[in-house]
Amino acid sequence: MLGGTVEVDEVFIVKKKHDNQTVVLGAIEKTSGRVAVRAVSDRLQGISDRFILDQVQAASLVCTDANPVYEHLSEFFGYGYEVCNHGMGHFRPTDRIENVWMRLRRFIRKIYHHVWKEHLPRLLKEFQARINVPEAFTSPTSFLTYVFQIS
């Protein structure tokens, strides 16, 4: 679980012109840089609440954009809550998670070229592992060592 100050945001993945976009929710811990990402069906409040409750420790400070689905975090769940309004040019509290989205898009483009909706959850697990455990991806030997340790 992520704790301390955590930035949370969502991004749309997969081509807009085919009308099959998938929402990806993500969170990044400010101090360690650890990441949690998950493909979800929609941007509804209950879905984002479940993601935050699963991934972020209680009493953490959650920084988000001005999306109204996050407004009740401090009121109902006891999280500290900081909002930044991208429309007013205020990006600083969520710049790390925005950087994660840039890295995710580059990862998809460079390694997979494109992604099918049904393969996105596996791709997100790999992406999350590459950020959280970078030493496991330095060589084939270190990767196999990492894989056999977790299984």
Image: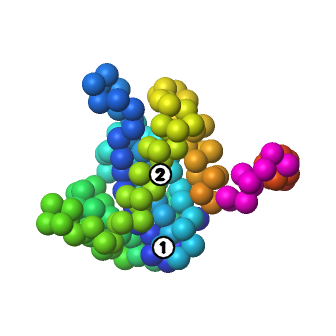
Location of the N terminus (image quadrant) = bottom right
Residue 78 vs 105, above or below: the answer is below
The spot of residue 128 in percent (x, y) is 58, 52
Q: What residue is disc 2 on?
A: 103
Residue placed at 68% from the left, 59% from the top?
A: 133
Residue 24 % position (x, y): 42, 45
Q: Is residue 139 magenta?
A: yes
Foreground of the two, 87 or 2: 87
Question: Pointer 2: residues within 10 angstroms few (<14), some, or many (20+)?
Answer: some
Question: In the orientation shown, which residue stands out farthest toward the top?
Answer: 18
Q: Quadrant of residue 121?
A: top right
Q: Earlier in the sequence, mark 1 or mark 2?
A: 1
**Residue 121 visible at all:** no
Q: Which residue is mark 1?
A: 30
Most extreme residue toward the left is 88
Q: Amino acid at mark 2?
A: Arg
Q: Residue at x 82, y 53 (%)?
A: 142
Q: Amino acid at mark 1?
A: Lys
- Between the C-alphas of marks 1 and 2, the distance is 16 Å
Residue 111 location in percent, x, y? 57, 37
Disc number lying in front (1 or 2):
2
Where does the magenta region start and end?
133-141
Residue at the location (45% across, 75% down)? 5
Q: Residue at x 39, y 70 (%)?
A: 62
Question: What secondary structure is marked by label 2?
Answer: helix
SS assignment at label 1: loop
Quarter-of-image position of residue 13: top left
**Residue situated in front as seen by the camera: 12 or 61:** 12
